[in-house]
Amino acid sequence: MIDTDKYEGHTPAPWDYEYGPTVSEHIDDADILTIKTEATFDEDKAWVNQRLAADAPLLLEAYKEKRDALHATHTWVEYNLLRLKNGAITKDELIKLLSDMCNDPAHKAIVGVTE
């Protein structure tokens, strides 16, 4: 889980990438990326922006994982709804499948299962 508290106070979108990166010519140097934001006049906010930009690859990977999990869940739900529609399972079986999938008391309450 990514600690998003360290991004509190960042400059809101839009950010611009009109200034090109500085690409290193030496193995012991690093590329320097530049991103243009609204002027902050605040060094702390600028560092928050820096941390957010530096963590972009981690945030993108976390987003992709959540997107894929959501897609898999959506596919699973659609599949089981079709099974219900086609008479392959009953409503009670679907509710049990959903409650087992969630295994969370709050989710179980939503689907009508009490323990």
Image (cartoon, rainbow, N blue to C red):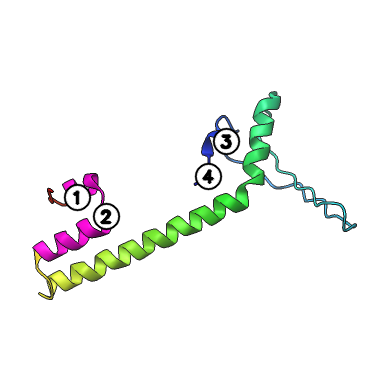
| Location of residue 4 in the rendering, given as x and y in whole percent from the top left corner | 52, 39
Element at badge 1? helix
Please tell me how many numbered marks the rendered image carries.
4
Question: Which range of residues does the magenta coloring cover?
Answer: 92-109
- What residue is pinned by disc 1? 108
First-in-chain label (1 vs 3): 3
Q: Residues within 10 Å of mark 4 (few under 14, many from 20)?
A: few
- What residue is pinned by disc 2? 102
Please tell me whether residue 49 is drawn above or below residue 97 in the rendered image. above
Task: Tell me the amino acid under the disc marked 1.
Answer: Lys
Residue visible at 16% across and 52% down in the picture: 111
First-in-chain label (3 vs 4): 4
Q: Residue furthest top?
A: 41
First-in-chain label (2 vs 1): 2
Task: Tell me the amino acid under the disc marked 2.
Answer: Cys
Q: Nearer the viewer, mark 3 or mark 2?
A: 2
Residue 7, labelled with which disc?
A: 3
First-in-chain label (3 vs 2): 3
Q: Residues within 10 Å of mark 3 (few under 14, many from 20)?
A: some
